[in-house]
Image: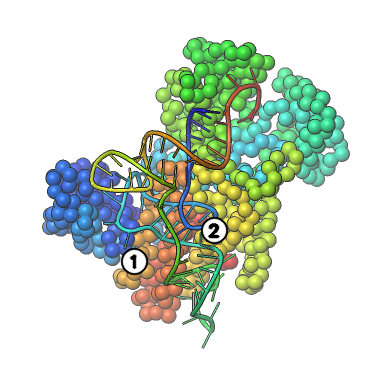
Amino acid sequence: MLPLLKDIISRHYATDLNKQADALFKLLESPKQAGHGHLSLPVFAWAKEHRKAPPVLAQEIAAQLSVRKPAGLEKIQAVSGFVNFTFENRFVQDLLSAEILKKRGHVGYAETGKGKKLVIDFASPNVAKPMHVGHLRASVIGQCLVNLARSQGYEVTGLNHLGDWGVQFGKLAWAYTKWGSEYPFKEKPFESLFQLYVRFHDEAEKNPELEAEGSKMFKKLEEGDAEIEKLWKMFVEISLKDYQRIWDMLGIKHDLVRGESFYNDRMKPVEQELKAKGLLEESDGAMIVRLGDDMAPCLIRKADGASLYATRDLASALYRMNELKADLNLYVVGVDQTLHFRQVFKVLELMGYPWVNKLHHIAFGMYRFKDAKLSTRKGHTIFLEDVFSRAIELVKEIIAKKNPDLANPDEVAKQVGIGAIVFNDLVNDRVKNVDFDWDRALDFEGDSGPYVQYCGVRCASLVRRYGKPVAETFQLDLTTPEEQELMRSLLNYQDTLRNAFENFKPHILAGYLIEVCHRFGQFYNKCRILGESDEIQAARMTLVQMVHVILEEGLRTLSIELPEAM
RNA sequence: GCGCUCGUAGCUCAGUUGGAUAGAGUACUUGACUACGAAUCAAGUGGUCGGAGGUUCAAAUCCUUCCGGGCGCGCCA
């Protein structure tokens, strides 16, 4: 939308201004204030070259360009050091309706990623542990980035780097053979598995010898013991099934599962390659790669011969780049692992791979809790599922009070409750830490998920009451300040998608949707729609329909559903 | 100690990558439902953008330094 307007200006005036069209394109900004038109061009840099005061130069340029305006451009005005472009009302309206109503399902999509593959590692939990609130961020941020990448034309592979290897499986296997029969594995497989996990750690605290038993079992697993491998497969399967149940609620879907175990036979070759390239070094019996003075060395192999986290991620990076042929490789993992990824990326750089700059650690801040430190081992955790159920229950109460006649209250409560939790997480910049607070997560008023959904529901309600098909084109100009402001916001949708993706920041989109809703609220309260003359009614309904489409598609990109009513 | 990161209204946070008068929500005060859905809208109160320097036409934004919070710093993942 807005890029189309920028395109018109930059192409039309490139020669007049003696600039390249694409350079001019980048200089054009979207002004904050309504009175400043649709696009604005700062001339300060040129003023210096021409040794003129910026307002004077702006005046001159505005006068010069006004002589030869492109179709659709209404006026060019100089304001201090800016040249502001205002397009004709009807032109903007037609552009919006063409770009929104006629492109439903893929509004604002771009082709910058066409023909490129993007691999994104997100929401990768460890087997046998239930997901707690800490897992929410990696899941929803990752899924939103998947959706954003698709909007930019990328071919996306959502990767589940499942934590399915390590000593804990030895422990679980030991616990299962010892106590497994005491738990209802048939009826509640995942709960049983988790109980075993907690019990093992409880008992191990009293009796430290159990740790050794676990290690022994894991060694057997590594050596390919068929019995234990069967158990391991079962644990993985049980866990994945339970995770998918939660992910279904969040609209999360991976395209490929490549757990840590997948790389078991790919780590030796990595080590050999490091050795061949002269990077490997022995230190206190362990094998390391030195990374210079400003970074701790990267540990490749323990003194006892076992491989490590970093080794696995090196193998994984090679797999993603060489075999999955990724053009962009993202890791949606918490900030606490920043050093780890810096080390891994640095090692790959030293190995001479030119694609290291295609790898990005998409870090997000940590959850913090007011009270106790939460440890999964001891079972002191806020489970994600509990957060969902509390949100859903609360929404049910609100529906019973505000809209008791709603046809499908259970389904809507789910959409609104979970939407609230997801939105609450995505609305803030991911780099910041989050103090988990029930009151705030369950606040459905003000700038929140339900607010955006409510706004969309109102649009849908208007369309229903209108009763006729909504026109896809405008028959008259909408000129009130509220209508103008609302349309100016809609123009920014395409840039918002691009911006959110390029920075890997979902909150840019979430914040934008809030802005559209504010503007819609103002429009809705000020401008009567139904009951006005046929022409006004029709034109305003077209605007309402556009808002509905933007909210629906914007929310969908955040992985949040928009109900028809609530 | 070293590295990374954050610091904006009482509280929770935005601020379009250096642009025009720093904005929302919440809380508090007040107004609007026989009204297209009040999970809404409107008005008011609330700011030394952590402090100090610097870069330039222009700094909440970039650089330096200090203060404060968070995370991390070789055999866990």
Mark number, residue A234: none
Q: Is residue A8 visible?
A: no
Residue A262 placement (x, y as % from top left)? 62, 27
Q: Secondary structure at mark 2?
A: helix
What is the spatial separation of the Cα atoms under label 1 and label 2, in whole angstroms?
Answer: 25 Å
Number of other residues with Cα within 10 Å of mark 1, as a class: few under 14, some 14 to 19, many 20 or more: some
Image quarter in which the C terminus of chain A is found: bottom right
Note whether A493 is above or below A234 in the view shown: below
Among numbered discs 1 and 2, the one appearing first in the sequence: 2
Nearest the viewer among A474 and A432 is A432
Q: Are marks 1 and 2 in contact (CB under 8 Å)?
A: no
Q: Which residue is mark 1?
A: A484
Q: Which residue is painted at 68% across and 16% down in the image?
A: A304
Residue A464 placement (x, y as % from top left)? 50, 71
Chain letter for the residue marked with disc 2 in the picture: A
Q: Which residue is painted at 57% across and 45% down in the image?
A: A137
Q: Which residue is painted at 37% across and 69% down in the image?
A: A482
Residues indicated by labels 1 and 2 sit on the same polypeptide chain: yes
Q: Which residue is mark 2?
A: A449
* Res. A122 image quadrant: top right
> Looking at the picture, which amino acid does disc 2 mark?
Gly
Residue A268 placement (x, y as % from top left)? 59, 17
Q: Secondary structure at mark 1?
A: helix
Note whether A61 is above or below A283 in the view shown: below
Image quarter in which the N terminus of chain A is found: bottom left
